[in-house]
Structures are given as C-alpha cells and as structure tokens.
Image (cartoon, rainbow, N blue to C red):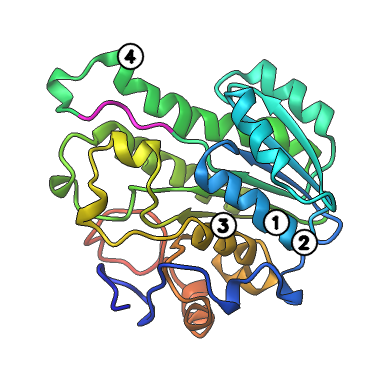
Amino acid sequence: MAAPLPSPTPTWHNDTYAAISPKRPELSAAGKTVVITGAGGGVGRETALAFADAGASRIVLLGRTEETIKTAASALPSSASAQTFAVDITQEDALQRVAAEVGTWDILIHTAGYVSTPGPIASSDTNEWWKSFETNAKGTFLSIKTFLPTANKTHATILALNTGTIALPSAALPGLSAYMASKLAETKIIEFLAAEQPNVFAATVHPGLIVSDIFKKSGAKAEAVPLDKPQLPAHFLVWLSSPEASFLKGRAVWANWDVDELKGQAKAIESGIQFTSGINGWPFSAA
C-alpha cells in the first residue's frame, strides 16, 4: 500500500513478507538464546513465535503476569526450550536474579511498555504520568544494565519498541506527553548503548499500528487508522537481529519499511545521522 506517513522506502508493509520471513536461512537464530520482555503482550508473543520459527534454541519470556507469559510459552514449538519469569522490569534486584538464572544470551528484545492515562500535563496525576517513565525509560535502562554482563561477548543484539517517538508532531497527539516523552528517552538510551558497546547491535523499532492494551488506552481508534498484523513487527525484529541489518546500528526504524529498499540505502544511512533522535531543523548533517 501507499505509505500513510512520510517513509524512506516507497514500499510500505502492513503484514509480513518473504524478505523478513523467519524461515529464511539468512535470518536463522539457530543455537541462540532470545530474551523477551513484555512477552505476554501481542507483539511479545508473536516475537517469541517468530524466533522459534527462526530456530532459536532457548526463548526466555519475561512479563508482569505469570499467566500471560506461561500462555505465550505454551504456544511455542517443542524445538525451542522456553523459560518464563514473572518480573517487574522496574525492580533492579528482581531483574538481576533473573539475569543470573538465564546466564549467557544472544538477543534481548524489549517489548514491555506502558501508556499513562491520556490528559493535559497541567491536570495529569503525577504518579500515573510518571509510570510511563518508570516502564519505558527506567525499565529499558534496568533491562540493559542487568542483562548486559551476561551477553554473548562476541556479538549481542538489543532491540526495543519505540512506538510514539517518530510518528507525528506533539500537537497531533494531545494528551500523550508521558508516553511520547518516555519513549523518546528510551530511543536515546538505545542510541547511547550502540555508541558505547562495540560488540552490541542496538536499535529501536516502531512496530506499526497494532491493536493492544496500549493502543486502546491511548485513545486510538482502530477504524480510523490502517492497522498492521502483529506478525509484521515480530518478523521484522528477526530480520533486524540478523547481519543483513548491521547498517542500522543505533537507529530508530519502522517495521512498515521495506527491508530490501532500506538495504539499498545502507551506505547513506551509515555515513550520516539519519534515523537518530535530535531537534528538527538542526542545521548540521553531523556533529
């Protein structure tokens, strides 16, 4: 379909397609351990299934609710060993215990997120507004900090969902200040991680428009937007963790963008600051 928003690729996807299929040999995750936060949610569950299809040998599912992550684990094929941990990602001690039990891992996918009750800054409840930062910023920071010591020393991948940071101007999304600002903070955390860790590939992904609890709480209307299939971001994450996507280290990308067309722009993307966060209109191409 035609892109409903400005896009660097002429092709815009709403569903999975051959180039990001987890069955592609080039995207194999054979022998790898994949850790997924927010694994009880729709995109988290689909991501676990996608990496199982890609041949991951162990999939670790983290979530706040034991029932939902166990349900997600039960859907995985027997070819993948599944572990579940009911944990609050804003609690450092709890995450440290989980990381110690998991041991060495290869890919960390951060799909956990929270949207505060929409409303103007002036009248928002302080604690409710700050919950977005607790999960989206602090939770991202703690997940990285606690798991990084046990990452594969040769090469590890850390990916996070960044819905909201690069979609529309703030004036077009009134009431979502907590969510948008906290997701922008998450994006910058991942950019710094990519700059600091030479053996870690890190990037953020806008998963598209998926009907979820966050989608509903944000006030979005399914009938008003072009919805995407949850398999799209899940399969895109598999592709993004492969060597084909190495040129996107430290970048914020959309699952809707066509990966073959992105690969055609690899040199230009790597040589500049394209798809990184900053101030619109900043006059310099590079610092």
The x, y position of residue 96, in whole percent, is 73, 23
Sequence order check, earlier mark of 2 and 1: 2
Q: Earlier in the sequence, mark 2 or mark 3?
A: 2
Q: Amino acid at mark 1?
A: Phe
Q: Earlier in the sequence, mark 4 or mark 1?
A: 1
Residue name at image x 31 percent, y 66 percent: 284
Q: Residue under circle 3?
A: 234
Q: Which residue is mark 1?
A: 51
Residue 75: x percent and y percent?
A: 69, 45
Dot 1 and dot 3 residues touching (CB under 8 Å): no
Near mark 4 (Cα within 10 A), the count class, few <14, some 14-19 or many ≥20, is: few
User: Disc 3 or 4, which lies upstream in sequence?
Assistant: 4
Gap in Å between the C-alphas at discs 1 and 3?
Answer: 8 Å
**Residue wearing tag 4:** 127
Cα distance in 3D space between marks 3 and 4 = 32 Å
Q: Is residue 46 magenta?
A: no
